[in-house]
Image: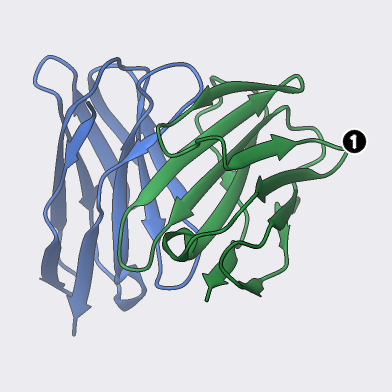
Chain colours: A green, B blue
Amino acid sequence: EPEVTQTPSHQVTQMGQEVILRCVPISNHLYFYWYRQILGQKVEFLVSFYNNEISEKSEIFDDQFSVERPDGSNFTLKIRSTKLEDSAMYFCASTFDSQSYEQYFGPGTRLTVT
Amino acid sequence: GQNIDQPTEMTATEGAIVQINCTYQTSGFNGLFWYQQHAGEAPTFLSYNVLDGLEEKGRFSSFLSRSKGYSYLLLKELQMKDSASYLCAVRPHNNDMRFGAGTRLTVKP
C-alpha cells in the first residue's frame, strides 16, 4: 500500500540554525500539507500546497517557514532560524484532490531545538 | 477564530459503546473529519461528514449537524486496541484543516 514517508525521523538542532524536513508524498497525489504537534498539544495546520503554490497557510506559518517541491517527488519544509518553541512533531500529509476526504499522514519528524 | 471543542478524556469498558462529542465554530465549513491517533504515531483517518446525518463504517459511525455545529463519533464493541486519542477536525475552507485538542479514550477490561 502506498504511504507518505518523512526523513529524518528525529532531528536535533541548535537554536538559530536552519532545518529542512523532507517528505515524499504518495506518488499520484496532488495536494500536500504540513502540520505540527507540540508534545501533548493538538495537531496544528501549517500550510497546504498545490500546483507549486501555497494554497492556504495558518497564522503559525510566518516568514521563518517556507515550503518547496524541488522535484517530482519531494516536498520540504524549511525553518530558517529555529526557536526553542519550534520543537514539535512535524507531519506531512497528502491527498489526491482538495475534496478527497482522506489525507494520508506520514510518520512524522520529531524536531528538537536546543 | 476557529473553535473546536471535545472532551479531554473518556473511559469505557471493553465491548461497550462510547460516543465522543465535538462542537465547532469555524469561519467556514467544508467537511468534518475524525482521526485516531495512538501515542507517538501519526493520525489515521476514520470518517468524514459534509452533509447532515450519520455515516457508518464498521464499528465506527459519525454524525453531523451543521446547523448545531455538532458532531459525534460512535465506537461500538470496544476493543482494547481502541485506546487512543480521537481527533475532531474541521476543514473551514478548501484546503486547510483545524483540529480539536483530541479526546483520550481509555478502554478497560
Q: State the residue at coordinates (73%, 32%).
A: A29
Using the image, name the chain to which the residue with label 1 belongs: A
Q: Position of residue B12 (x, y in %)?
A: 12, 70
Left or right: A30, with B8 as reference point: right
Q: Give the farthest residue toward the right.
A: A71
User: What amino acid type should be assigned to the residue bearing mark 1?
Assistant: Gly
Can you identify the residue that label 1 sits on? A72
Above or below — where is A98 with respect to A34? above
Q: In the rendered view of the protein, which quadrant contains the C terminus of chain B?
A: bottom left
Q: Position of residue A86 (x, y in %)?
A: 48, 59
Q: Nearer the viewer, residue A105 or B77?
A: A105
Figure quadrant of residue B5:
top left
Q: Is residue B14 visible to the viewer in this orientation of the structure?
A: no
Q: Is residue B7 visible to the viewer in this orientation of the structure?
A: yes
Q: Position of residue A111 (x, y in %)?
A: 57, 67
Q: Give the farthest residue toward the front.
A: A16
Q: State the residue at coordinates (37%, 68%).
A: A39
Q: Give the farthest residue toward the bottom.
A: B109
Left or right: B62, with B37 as reference point: left
Above or below — where is A48 with respect to A93? above
Circle 1 residues within 10 Å: few <14, some 14–19, many ≥20:
few
